[in-house]
Amino acid sequence: MADEDEDLSHLRTMNLDPAVDEDGDEQALDYGEAFAKMANSDNATLHLPKRGEKDFESHSTDLQMSKLDASRLAMHNVLSWQRTHTQKNHVPAMYDPTTNMAFVNKPKTSMFLTMGRSRGGKEWLLPEEALFLIERGSVDCRWPIKGEENGGKMLEGAPMSLQGAYAAFLGYEAGVGGKLTMEMYTVYSGLKRSGYVVFRHGSWDNARADIQPLTPKSQAQADRKEGYWTSFWAELWRRIAQPSYTISPESLAHGPLIRPGLYRSYADIFRAMSLIPSHERTTPPTFTLPPNPNNPFRIHFDVWKTSGSQRFRKSNPPPPDFRVCVINARETDVPTAAQLSDLLATVPDDGPKENAAIMNKLKHGQRNVLLAVVDNGIPSYIRVADVEFSREKVYERPATRGGKGGGRGGRGRGRGRR
Amino acid sequence: MAAQTATATANGSTSKVKDAGSNITPKKPRQRRPNYNEIHAKPLPFQVYPLPAFIPHNPISLVRIAISLLSQSIWRPSSQPAAYKAYFSTETQSIHVTDPKAIRALWEQGFWGAGSLSRSEPQWLAQEKRKRGVEAITTAEEVTRKRREERRQFKLERAKAQREAIEQQLRDEGKLDAETNLEELVESGSVTESPRGTFYPSDGGVPLSDVAASSSGSLMDQVEDKLVEATPALQEEIHNQEHLQLTFEEAFFLSYVLGVLDLHKALPVAPTLSNLEPDNSFMMKYVVFHHFRSLGWVVRPGIKFACDYLLYLRGPAFTHAEFAIMIVPAYSDPYWSATSARAETCKKKAQRNWWWLHRLNRVQTQVHKTLLLVYVEIPPPWDDCATESGSLNVGNVLKRYRVREFVWRRWSPNRNRD
């Protein structure tokens, strides 16, 4: 019932008078220029251009036609841009059939700051990393020549085509964690291109990952002790002001839970009516399902943002910002409670800040995981968070008197929905 | 925002005067919002008697506490109101409350039920009175209608401005004479009209697509005018034709937990739990309803948003709903996987595919709600819950369910990088 653009205030920000319209034109030209720039600059200074206003219909003005032509031309220029590899940046790699990995002798580009593992003086690339680099054209991978393995001259091997690379690296079961599927590679390359640092989580070899324990409560909170007399008076006051109401078995069986009588506060009533047990989150999580190597709900990738305060270092990575589980939408359903519970047991506690607003706390949740649901190559990311509603008791919030008046703040004048 | 300032100043009479004085413009003064904080001060249809505050440096406060403790122990006030009468209607499959006092109390103290002729708050009478000019109050429905009209007007104006800009451009390019306008060009075929095109007839400024709507609107007005003329001035009291409808869960909660509802006409089926399956949809919905109500949330049916429930922080009068709940059954109990046939049926019942999830999530993001999947652990059938009298122990049955909440949100790689 509510269109995206139904809100008036939001509509008003769009320009109405033709004077402002010129601004839009300028932006549109910007786009074209940026394309043109893209075509003849090297990729160090590239950034995505801003898009201008969108014309929804043709109104046969020359202005529109010329703008369209300019944009088309710019796009064609970009597409026809000849990509070259300089001798300096040429990185040869060699395929290793026993491990289904590729290795590089001299990592030259900055790509290797966030990829690969160095072992034995070589930089080893996991299947997804090798495939990604080959696809980008950053690495020239060669098939090894039979007989003389690891001969110093890499360039003597037969060049590996992109098709060959896909065939070799995807779905090969025997390699080091070589269970890379097309879905996983789609997610990996998509996140890499979006500018994240992505590494494989664990080794993928075990039936499942380890349980992550709860974060221990801070000592200061647990050890807060009051003086004897203070606690005595506090206890006395609590008994007078907030008597605890026990529910008799009779009223539990047939109701009403809240016996008629005198109640001091609504919080007492709410506390008394609490009946449905919620998931226990104070004890360490446990697995509910038996270990199963084919369980699709496992963490596949650890993802880091690159713009964080700390620089990413391959040798000593900080705790990842996101954990991604890749799912084939056609073969897997929405996880059941047990599957989700087991998956979330393998991610560490990441609770909200203690002083955050109640809604932010609830939306953030205690543990979270990213599900990348891939349907034939199209990934869709969903963040699933385990939220403890029973910890945020709404009735214990201080009453908001006056202040905002009639309330209904939040998102301006409602949109006819409540 | 204007709405907020209006309500904020509603308390102070001085600012009220100032407002009225400064408003020289002939614009109609904005309707004052009722003070919802006062109307909906009670979160439950209960009266509580808090003790007077204890102030350490004021000994009189102790005396006040003693007096109120003493007087309340002699004459013990009851927090519970006399039970409201309600009856079950087989035709509408809902619980009706017809007593106006009960309707007001149930709506104002906890937002129970919905008016049968209104959006949610029973406001048919107020709307009717306003229609007949007896009272001048605006209901929420009218506000929405007005806003929609404004929005339509605004869109028309915007389209017109764009149209004019294009015409100007065409004139500048010499494709259009000073006198001719676009329509003639359309007819002569030199301009094409797209499906989105909003061409105006030459006489007025109304787009063609809107002519039909506006003429029918005027027709409706005429009919309404005729009706008004036909009916004699109705000054006698308008009979309220509206009643409050409670859902089954609300009615059960009000009578089983709070004991404030007196169901008159008994349900057609004697309430025995023995013929209820544990994964009965009422039981699942009630368990979730009870869980969130007992935490202090206002829980309202979410059929309009394609979900099971909506969660409001204080109630629909104050804020928009923040969470949309969808209930998913979970069969983790070993009983449900004991036999393969049982496991198969349970798997089918708990199965949801990714298209279902994305559909749901799309709707919820569009209406700015956070999707909450609530997994309800279904207990094995209750054979041992019967009391001596043969009927079942409701409380013990409810305690066997377990709920777990997960927040699901779409995650975009492009928006979480920094």
Image: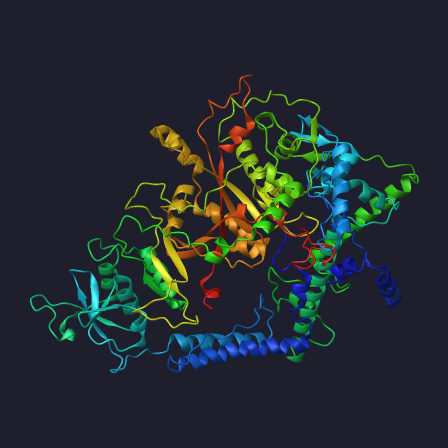
Q: Position of residue A226 (x, y in %)?
A: 55, 53
Query: Most extreme residue toward the left, as rendered?
Result: A147
Residue beneath the point at 41% across and 76% down? A78
> Which of A204/A222 is in front?
A222
The outermost residue toward the top is B389
Within the image, what quadrant is residue A12 found in?
bottom right
Please indicate, yes or no, whether residue B222 appears anywhere in the rendered image: yes
Residue B44 lies left or right of residue B275; in this view the side is: right
- Quadrant of res A236: top right
Residue A256 on image: x %, y %:
64, 29
User: Residue B298 occupies which quadrant of the picture?
Assistant: top right
**B352 vs B212, nearest the viewer:** B352
Position of residue A128 in the picture relative to residue B114 (left or right): left
Q: Is residue A47 left or right of residue B253?
A: left
Q: Is residue A345 left or right of residue B368?
A: left
- Above or below, comparing residue A169 to residue B162 in the picture: above
Residue B312, can we see it? no
**How many numbered badges does the structure rendering display?**
0
Q: Residue at x 84, y 60 (%)?
A: B29
Q: How is the image coloured?
A: rainbow
* Front one among B336 and A364: A364
* Residue A158 placement (x, y as % from top left): 16, 69
Pinpoint residue B79: horizontal percent, then vertical percent.
72, 36
Position of residue B56 relative to residue A163, above or below, is: above
